[in-house]
Amino acid sequence: MRTTVVGITALLACTSLCAGDIIDTVEIGEGFYTSTIQIDFANGNGYLFDVHWQDGGTTGWDLLLAIVEESDDVSLDYGVSEWGVFLQGIEVFEDSDWGVGAGWPEVEDYWHYWQRESSSESWEFSSIGADVRQVSDGSWDGWVFLSPGEPQSVPSPGVLALLGVGGLFRNRRSRHSS
């Protein structure tokens, strides 16, 4: 039985890693309020940034700039026009994607911007730019490259399955011990 559980656990871990996951969560800034920025790359790797901020009037774009200012491992490539800011590329640690929608509509080669007001709400594709969106305490902004789909779930389904198998093994083991 132990061999089977170990084998299933290893398979789930490999499946979860191969499909991509939230790779890291990083704390940024200081302040009473916190908003989360989720960045999902085309390879499936995602990163969470819990950004702490102080004053009202903070936008989703302000949060991205705060991440870049505080972290040497994150960079942005963007353009500014009369229509606002257009994100072209993001690099986080070893992951990076860049695109301006040149392949659209056949290829979604640009950054899609999502938002939600709390982790318990559903993601909504943003109808406004990050430079206009006013964030609130507990809000989430998501950036997804090469896919029109919403940001991946946190924690990812593979991690939840892995935890479930571990819980079953502990329950079965404790029943046999008594």
Image (tube, grey):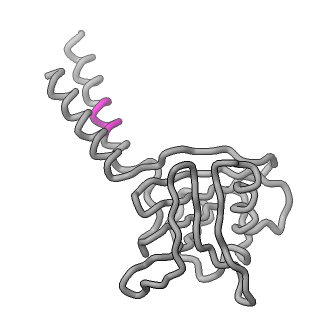
* 18 or 115, nearer to the observer: 18
* Residue 73 spot, x, y in % from top left: 64, 49
Residue occupying the point 42% across, 84% down? 103
| Chain part drawn in magenta | 162-166
Instruction: Check the picture and name the quadrant holding the N terminus.
Output: top left
* Residue 74 spot, x, y in % from top left: 64, 54
Report if residue 130 lies within the magenta region. no
Return the residue found at the far right: 55
* Residue 17 spot, x, y in % from top left: 35, 45
In this view, 107 is above or below 93: below
Give the overall secondary structure of the magenta segment: helix
* 36 or 70, nearer to the observer: 70
Report if residue 165 lies within the magenta region. yes
Residue occupying the point 59% across, 73% down? 88
* Residue 82 spot, x, y in % from top left: 75, 90
Instruction: Check the picture and name the quadrant holding the C terminus.
Output: top left
Residue occupying the point 76% across, 54% down? 69
In this view, 132 is above or below 119: below
In this view, 52 is above or below 174: below
